[in-house]
Amino acid sequence: MKKQQINNIGVEVPAPARECTDAHCPFHSAVSLRGRIFTGKVIKEPFHRTTTIEFPRQWYISKFERYEKRRSRIKAHVPDCLDVKKDSSVRVMETRKISKTKNFVVIEVRP
């Protein structure tokens, strides 16, 4: 069996140990990554290669000259070569639109 080549995705992340044939995997296919990078927590178990990531942010309120805590939720694609579970910390990066609501892909699972 021929060993797949792992692509350089332009970000310093460890390469996955497993191989996959996922068409939207940044490591084993031609999907390019660009734009924003977020680190968040998986709040929904991956289903059909999609998961929901939540991360906190601060929003400035000019009237009170203070910040308030808010949270953002995004949907991200989970490649077959990464093992993502609920409540794990992941790093996601923006890519081209994969579906109607999905334009991020998981690039790293943090311990």
Image (tube, helix red, strand yellow):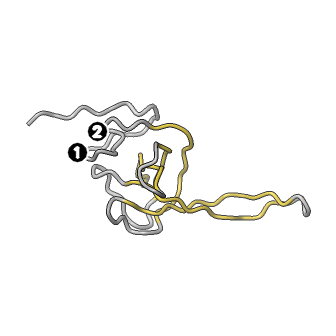
Q: Which mark is residue 94?
A: none
Image point (40%, 52%), residue name: 109
The kind of secondary structure element at disc 2 is loop
Q: Which residue is mark 2?
A: 28
> Along the horizontal axis of the image, is 36 left or right of 103?
right
Q: Residue at x 68, y 64 (%)?
A: 70
Q: Is residue 105 left or right of residue 16?
A: right
Q: Quadrant where the C terminus lies?
A: bottom left
Label 1 CA crowd tier, 10 Å (few <14, some 14–19, many 20+): few
Q: Which mark is residue 21?
A: 1
In the image, farthest residue toward the front: 100
Three-letter residue code for mark 1: Thr
Q: Quadrant of the N terminus?
A: top left
Report helix, strand or loop for mark 1: loop
Nearest the viewer among 33 and 12 is 33
Q: Whole-percent x and y of residue 39?
A: 53, 52
Cα–Cα gap, marks 2 and 1: 7 Å
User: Crowdedness of circle 2 by 10 Å Cα count: few (<14), some, many (20+)?
Assistant: many
Q: Amino acid at mark 2?
A: His
Closest to the observer, 104 or 60? 104
Q: Residue at x 46, y 55 (%)?
A: 102
| Mark count | 2
Please state the horizontal and vertical placement of residue 13, each as a whole percent of the image.
42, 39
**Frontmost residue, 30 versus 12:** 30
Which mark sits nearer the N-terminus, 2 or 1? 1
x then y, percent, for residue 45: 38, 68
